[in-house]
Image (tube, helix red, strand yellow):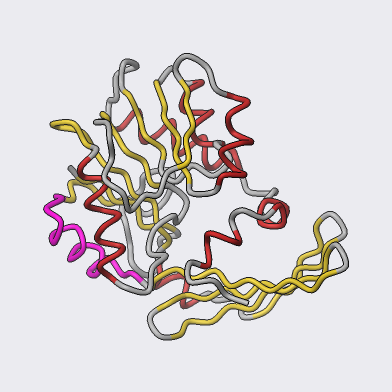
Amino acid sequence: METKDWFTSWFDTSYYHTLYKHRNDTDAQLFMQNITSFLQLPKSAHIADLPCGKGRHSIYLNSLGYKVTGGDLSKNSIDFAKQFENDSLQFEVWDMRKQLQHKYDAIFNLFTSFGYFDDDTEDLLVLKAMKSGLKENAVLVLDFLNVIKTEANLVQQEVKTIDGIEFHIKREIKDGFILKHIDFFADDTQHSYTEKVKFLSIEKMKSYFEQVGLKITHTFGDYELNPFEEQSSDRLILVAE
């Protein structure tokens, strides 16, 4: 059964976090160190992390000395993240399509948290909303996958067993989307979810940014901030203002 927005149901389950529990925090932390250093963000900067999931990037950015606000549509994730709140770290339930109420020195959209929607206008709404939350001279950092390399190296089928759950994963590229079908049996029930991320090349991304009036200032291809190469880079990281 698919709801209209696949991410609303899937990201709110405990199974989502089980499947991705082995994500490499070292990579994420290296990226946060490198990008804040590259941007020369002063410690007084207020960063919005959208969407923030359970808050792993937000918590780390806060540990570097920044004031951070994390927002995510998943109430379960925010409820979990709230245990880490302090005077300079806050979490709230947040739909990234909505205009931002506050202005930030930087907005980070990390770990392929973009391109979820069937309709381009909704993806543009996300960019417009983020733009609305930027102070003058503030930056947006959008960390996406490199679709060209992803397509060339697509693992069509795999099985992962984590915490006794056997996740059957199938990937395909269809109708302008990278689809990841996830099937598993847990808690006496057969579960089926599909992650959908739009196949956004750098050209398509540039046209999105232009349409909402964001100017791309830098493009990187990995968390070490090496230049973006369409055939070989793992990530497509865009810095805009």
Q: Is residue 203 magenta?
A: yes
> Is 200 placed above or below 133 here?
below
> Is 136 placed above or below 65 here?
below
Q: Quadrant of the C terminus?
A: top left
Q: Residue at x 24, y 69 (%)?
A: 204
Q: Position of residue 234 (x, y in %)?
A: 45, 59
In the image, is 114 to the left or to the right of 84? Answer: left
In the image, is 49 to the left or to the right of 84? Answer: left
Q: Residue at x 72, y 74 (%)?
A: 183
Q: Position of residue 217 (x, y in %)?
A: 18, 46
Quarter location, residue 182: bottom right
Q: Residue at x 61, y 53 (%)?
A: 12
Extreme bottom residue here?
175
Q: Quadrant of the N terminus?
A: bottom right
In the image, which residues are magenta? 200-215
Quarter location, residue 34: top left
Magenta: predominant secondary structure element?
helix
Q: Position of residue 125 (x, y in %)?
A: 26, 58
Q: Position of residue 232 (x, y in %)?
A: 41, 65
> Is 59 placed above or below 86 here?
below
* Residue in the foreground of this view, choosing between 159 and 12: 12
* Residue in the foreground of this view, choosing between 66 and 124: 124
